[in-house]
Image (tube, coloured by chain):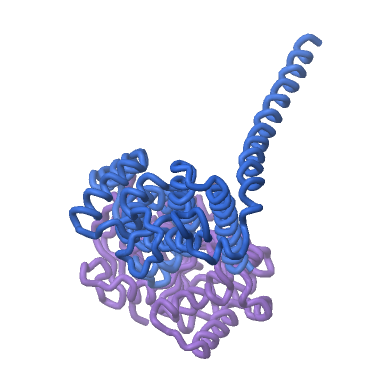
Chain colours: A purple, B blue
């Protein structure tokens, strides 16, 4: 398996603080890579650096770079809309737009110019099925997405991203507001999706990372402390700080 | 015991004051409406709306002034809404706070405070004389547009500011360009706010007299192009009463004006509610 993503000496600063410090990381395709660690450790910034959302904010700067299939994504010539369709992201809070469920899922495909009703309907159904939401919403596709429950909204956001048919799927605590049953169904989905996608997951707890991920990286205060296969990270980590965190001494 | 009694008294006084304030407001409103409508409503008839004024407005109806009013409002909206909404989008989405945006904002704030007669004078000097448009629907509409631009800009800005950043982030993350993000994720949610600005503009345009006389004239002839001079209902009302031509006709026009404003506001609210309900179904 080849490197899907290669992060090289990457640092990221917001106006006044450094969020990521000299990150070097390779992520292979068709794997679930888990980024975990305590709050404010740079996990979300790492994800948003991969689809160039982080540098939309004024006053940020970065050094180093990131490659996607060997392409430098910080090259000024990169088409950002194309990049973001290749690297889909689900945010940590459910963020449905105040339009219908159908229109939410069709938002991305419509942006890329797909107009035929039939084609859109197929895409929407496929995405909602993949996100284990179809059965619950198929009779109310055209009512406002804001009426769905928190868990359904989060799965809707997953479906909305899947509708782009991205190559990389980034999920920022996709189960944080979900009950155990929905969480289990999302996790099953992720494991299934692995064969078509490269998945980067910020889990909402360590157990989730150990259940679904192949490899994991521990982020602490902007540093990537260590990364490796999940069994190693969670049973015999090399770094004292990782061990303290996974055994629950802090965090 | 004493403390609680003072507090109790404060409570009573506050209540009395607030009730008096509210009731006086309503009383004043009812008084004005009653005055105009009791004198004006008996004058109203179908012919009053469908006939053109004759002999300076002493006889006939007010058809040409209704057409003049609508024509002027439509021209004003046609020019001010795209410009105003465009400027607001520029200020919020396409620049950050900078010298340029501060200058624009300072400029619009100043414009908002300028008395309407000054706009009338500008419109007369610039549109009517300099651009040689004469007293016309176009001159008057452009003058009203300039007068209302600050309102449209600031209401649109406020509306756009309330849209959460997460909507934009979602749109970008799904491969949206800046323009797609603005038109599909931001503007639809800001539309009710923008609409409020337009309603304010319509209200101000309907009521304007001085600036309209200076730029659109006060002709009672049926207009046949954008370059025709017209008379609006407010101007008609003013001239009829001021020149003592016919108080009856003046009151009739006043009553029609009130009905028109009521009609526009109810339609606008109906449309707005329909839009909101349609989106939140």
Seen at 41% across and 47% down, the residue is: B209
Query: Is residue A53 rendered to the left or right of residue A139?
Result: left
Query: Is residue A84 rendered to the left or right of residue A120?
Result: left
A73 w.r.t. B10: above or below:
below
Seen at 25% across and 72% down, the residue is: A78
- Pick the residue in front: B202 or A139: B202
B127 w.r.t. B180: above or below:
above
Q: Residue at the top extreme?
A: B2
Seen at 48% across and 55% down, the residue is: B57
B97 w.r.t. A86: above or below:
above
- Pick the residue in front: B271 or B27: B27
Where, quadrant-wise, is the N terminus of chain A in this rendering? bottom left
Number of numbered callouts drawn? 0
Q: Residue at the front extreme?
A: B55
- Pick the residue in front: B261 or A85: B261
Seen at 54% across and 88% down, the residue is: A122
x%, y% of residue A142?
A: 61, 76
Query: Is residue B152 rendered to the left or right of residue B273?
Result: left
Q: Is residue A55 visible?
A: no
x%, y% of residue A24?
A: 31, 62
Q: Residue at the right extreme?
A: B1
Q: Can residue B10 be seen in this view?
A: yes
x%, y% of residue A152?
A: 63, 69
- Pick the residue in front: A100 or A68: A100
Task: Tell me the quarter of the picture where residue B76 sits.
Answer: bottom left
Q: Residue at the bottom extreme?
A: A118
Task: Tell me the quarter of the picture where residue A225 sits.
Answer: bottom left
């Amino acid at each position: 398996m080849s490197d899907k993503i290669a992060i090289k000496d990457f640092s990221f600063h917001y106006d006044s603080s450094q969020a990521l410090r000299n990150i070097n990381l390779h992520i292979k395709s068709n794997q679930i890579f888990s980024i975990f660690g305590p709050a404010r450790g740079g996990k979300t910034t790492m994800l948003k650096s991969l689809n160039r959302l982080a540098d939309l904010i004024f006053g940020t700067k970065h050094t180093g770079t990131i490659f996607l299939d060997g392409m430098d994504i910080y090259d000024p010539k990169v088409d950002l809309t194309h990049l973001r369709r290749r690297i889909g992201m689900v945010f940590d809070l459910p963020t449905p737009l105040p339009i219908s469920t159908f229109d939410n899922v069709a938002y991305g495909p419509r942006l890329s110019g797909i107009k035929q009703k039939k084609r859109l309907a197929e895409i929407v159904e496929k995405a909602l099925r993949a996100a284990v939401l179809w059965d619950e919403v198929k009779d109310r596709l055209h009512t406002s997405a804001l009426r769905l429950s928190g868990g359904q909204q989060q799965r809707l956001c997953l479906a909305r991203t899947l509708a782009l048919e991205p190559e990389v799927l980034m999920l920022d605590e996709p189960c944080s507001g979900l009950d155990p049953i929905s969480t289990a169904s999302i996790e099953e989905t992720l494991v299934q999706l692995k064969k078509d996608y490269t998945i980067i997951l910020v889990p909402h707890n360590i157990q989730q990372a150990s259940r679904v991920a192949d490899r994991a990286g521990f982020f602490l205060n902007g540093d990537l402390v260590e990364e490796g296969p999940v069994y190693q990270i969670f049973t015999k980590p090399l770094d004292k700080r990782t061990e303290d965190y996974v055994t629950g001494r802090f965090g | 015991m004493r403390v609680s009694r003072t507090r109790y008294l404060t409570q009573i006084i506050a209540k009395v004051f607030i009730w008096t304030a509210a009731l006086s407001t309503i009383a004043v409103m009812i008084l004005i409406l009653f005055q105009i409508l009791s004198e004006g409503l008996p004058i109203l008839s179908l012919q009053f709306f469908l006939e053109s004024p004759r002999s300076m407005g002493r006889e006939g109806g007010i058809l040409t002034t209704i057409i003049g009013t609508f024509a002027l409002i439509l021209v004003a909206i046609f020019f001010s809404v795209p410009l105003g909404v465009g400027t607001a989008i520029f200020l919020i989405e396409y620049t950050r706070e900078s010298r340029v945006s501060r200058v624009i904002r300072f400029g619009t704030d100043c414009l908002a405070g300028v008395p309407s007669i000054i706009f009338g004078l500008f419109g007369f000097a610039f549109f009517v004389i300099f651009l040689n448009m004469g007293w016309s629907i176009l001159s008057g509409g452009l003058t009203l547009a300039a007068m209302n631009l600050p309102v449209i800009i600031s209401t649109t800005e406020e509306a756009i500011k309330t849209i959460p950043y997460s909507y934009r982030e979602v749109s970008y993350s799904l491969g949206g360009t800046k323009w797609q993000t603005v038109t599909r994720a931001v503007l639809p949610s800001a539309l009710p706010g923008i609409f409020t600005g337009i309603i304010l503009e319509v209200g101000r345009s309907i009521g304007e007299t001085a600036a309209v006389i200076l730029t659109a004239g006060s002709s009672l002839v049926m207009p046949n192009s954008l370059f025709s001079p017209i008379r609006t209902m407010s101007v008609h009302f003013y001239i009829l009463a001021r020149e003592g031509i016919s108080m009856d006709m003046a009151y009739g026009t006043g009553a029609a004006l009130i009905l028109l404003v009521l009609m526009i506001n109810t339609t606008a609210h109906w449309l707005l509610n329909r839009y909101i309900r349609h989106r939140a179904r």
